[in-house]
Image: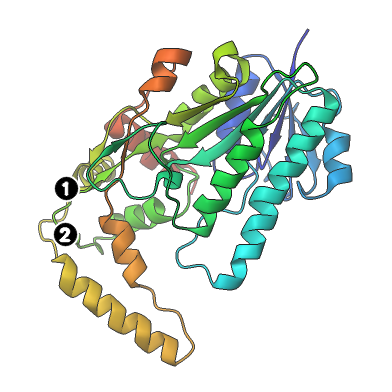
């Protein structure tokens, strides 16, 4: 009998990759998103439902007949959110997760997979982090994701079996992904980017199609229940290496010059403070520079060793496909 998978937040940047990955291996897919999907984003036979994960009645309704849930719906990270946004992050990321998990338990769902983030670890400070490393989230997004993890990991079925699996994703990139890497790619494409610092700070990435493969295993593998897994491409990449891979995919040479961190951060602070005086936001802030120069290296051997996950895309092939698809979709 074909199993039914409910995917929340499926119209987001990673959603279509996850829908297609699960659809291709034969699951019946039901999506639940607050936004109407763009035309052609899903295969035509997908069961599409519009709704809000904070609406208990709607969530309980769409949970009927579901075997597993992939919970992606969330309020995502933004740089320097105002303090008043904390309540919204808590309402969506914690409250929404609680609503989904409670409905899943009530409906007899066998697995709940939560999309989380390696941002829950905080800064690596030169270390290599793994699933046993202490967590130290320093943003509303990461803090509320960590709280959502506990809700999922504490979930038990009618027989007391653990239902939850947490996937802590590295920085996801792909042709639909918005945010820092999209802005970096656009700046490099337009020859408008000058690196800051040595470029030796490490980053941990994963291509969006590989995320789809990880979800397949998290939904079905018996060893995934009650576990946390980091999901990455299996390596750590110096920022210079990422820039070189993007430039190679664009057919451009990487920037030859770089700027020292301290003066740039000082100048960004002046812009930020000046903009605040006039009630405006600065395009570059201290937090922007700190984010750019941060070092985070996260190990993902557990999902490879225990679930058999094998990333199919390295940095060069992932960015080559990202740029190609981006050009095709213009």
Q: Is residue 53 above or below residue 80?
A: above
Q: Is residue 289 above or below residue 123?
A: below
Q: List x then y, in percent, for residue 202.
A: 24, 44
Toward the bottom, the furthest residue is 278
Q: Nearer the viewer, residue 261 or 211?
A: 261
**Badge 1 local density, few (<14 within 10 Å), some, or many (20+)?**
some
Residue plotted at (37% across, 42% down): 323
Q: List x then y, in percent, for residue 196.
A: 19, 62
Is residue 308 visible to us here? no
Kindly identify which numbered label has been placed on residue 197.
2
Give the image quarter of residue 291.
Answer: bottom left
Q: List x then y, in percent, for residue 11.
A: 65, 43
Q: Is residue 67 above or below residue 7?
A: above
Task: State the quadrant of the N terminus.
Answer: top right
Toward the top, the furthest residue is 1
Q: Is residue 194 above or below residue 155?
A: below
| Secondary structure at numbered mark 2 | loop
CA separation in Å, label 1 and label 2: 8 Å
Asked whether the beta carbons under mark 1 and mark 2 sit within 8 Å of each other, the answer is yes
Q: Nearer the viewer, residue 149 or 213?
A: 149
Give the image quarter of residue 284.
Answer: bottom left
Residue plotted at (29% across, 60% down): 190
Kindly identify which numbered label has been placed on residue 200.
1
| Secondary structure at numbered mark 1 | loop
Residue plotted at (29% across, 58% down): 292
Q: List x then y, in percent, for residue 38.
A: 67, 46
């Amino acid at each position: 009998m074909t199993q039914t998978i409910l995917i929340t937040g499926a119209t987001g940047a990673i959603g279509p990759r996850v829908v297609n990955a699960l659809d291709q291996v034969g699951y019946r897919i039901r999506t639940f998103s607050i936004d109407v999907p763009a035309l052609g984003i899903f295969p035509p036979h997908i069961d599409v439902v519009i709704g809000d994960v904070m609406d208990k009645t709607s969530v309980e309704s769409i949970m009927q007949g579901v075997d597993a849930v992939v919970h992606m719906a969330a309020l995502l990270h933004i740089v320097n959110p105002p303090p008043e946004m904390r309540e919204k992050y808590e309402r969506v990321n914690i409250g929404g997760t609680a609503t989904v998990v409670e409905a899943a338990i009530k409906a007899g769902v066998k697995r709940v997979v939560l999309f989380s983030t390696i941002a829950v670890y905080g800064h690596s400070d030169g270390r290599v982090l793994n699933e046993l490393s202490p967590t130290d989230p320093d943003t509303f997004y990461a803090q509320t994701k960590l709280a959502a993890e506990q809700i999922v990991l504490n979930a038990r079925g009618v027989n007391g079996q653990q239902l939850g699996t947490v996937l802590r994703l590295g920085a996801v990139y792909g042709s639909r992904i918005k945010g820092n890497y999209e802005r970096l790619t656009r700046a490099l494409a337009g020859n408008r980017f000058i690196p800051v610092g040595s470029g030796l700070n490490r980053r941990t990435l994963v291509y969006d199609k590989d995320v789809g493969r990880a979800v397949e295993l998290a939904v079905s593998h018996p060893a995934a229940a009650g576990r946390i897994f980091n999901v990455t491409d299996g390596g750590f990449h110096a920022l210079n290496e990422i820039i070189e891979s993007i430039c190679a995919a664009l057919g451009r040479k990487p920037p030859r010059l770089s700027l020292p961190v301290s003066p740039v951060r000082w100048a960004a602070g002046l812009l930020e403070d000046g903009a605040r005086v006039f009630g405006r936001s600065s395009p570059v802030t201290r937090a922007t520079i700190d984010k750019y120069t941060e070092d985070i290296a996260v190990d993902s051997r557990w999902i490879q060793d225990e679930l058999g996950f094998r990333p199919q895309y390295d940095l060069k092939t992932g960015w080559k496909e990202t740029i190609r698809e981006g050009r095709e979709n213009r």
